[in-house]
Image (cartoon, rainbow, N blue to C red):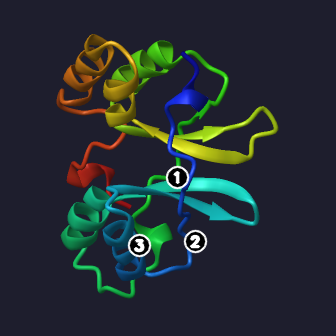
Amino acid sequence: MRVSEAMSREVRIASPDQSIAEAAQIMAEIDAGSLPVGEEDRLVGMITDRDIAIRGVAKSCEPDTKVREVMTPDVKYCFEDEDLAHVAKNMGNIQVRRLPVLNRQKRLVGIVSLGDVATETQPRHAGEALKKVSEAGGLHGQSLAGIR
């Protein structure tokens, strides 16, 4: 099965110049824990509810703090034509629960989550990925040393 068959196509994008309060409101509206961050038609980062809660609170950020101050700028992504089981394994290896999905022209076309993997493939793929995602450390580790 290809990523395009399981991904969510309706994706909201945050701007790096939006406030973290606005990003949190968007997440609440769409019932999601992360948003791709885009600027001038390019992905420049990801912001998660965890980034806002932990990085923002740890730095005593105000609600009007810009998304760019707490987002993760190292964007990991997958392509819509990739094998979903392979992408799930990669999600576990890089310890993320959601990935932006791009077409081969590197345009955002969706987002895939471990929930999508769980409902569209054999449950073991999602389970194996979730086990790795849940291990300490990883790309979105929230140690104070990693806070900008």
> What percent of the width, then of the height, locates residue 69?
44, 70
Mark 2 vs 1, N-terminal side: 2
Binning the other alpha carbons within 10 Å of mark 2 as few (below 14), some (14 to 19) or many (20 upward) gives many
- Relative to 42, is 72 on the left or the right? left
Disc 3 target residue: 26
In whole angstroms, how far apart are the C-alphas of marks 2 and 1?
12 Å
Identify the image quadrant of residue 115. Answer: top left
| 124 or 63: nearer the viewer | 124
How far, Cα to Cα, is label 3 from label 1? Answer: 19 Å
Residue 105, compared with residue 42, is above or below; it is above
Q: Which mark is residue 15?
A: 2
Disc with the residue nearer the chain's start (3 vs 1): 3
Which label lies toward us, 2 or 3?
3
Per the image, the residue denoted by label 1 is 73
Residue 136: quarter of image: top left
Indicate the quadrant where residue 98 lies.
top left
Are the residues at dot 2 and dot 3 in contact (C-beta closer than 8 Å)? no
Q: Nearer the viewer, mark 2 or mark 1?
A: 2
Number of numbered discs:
3
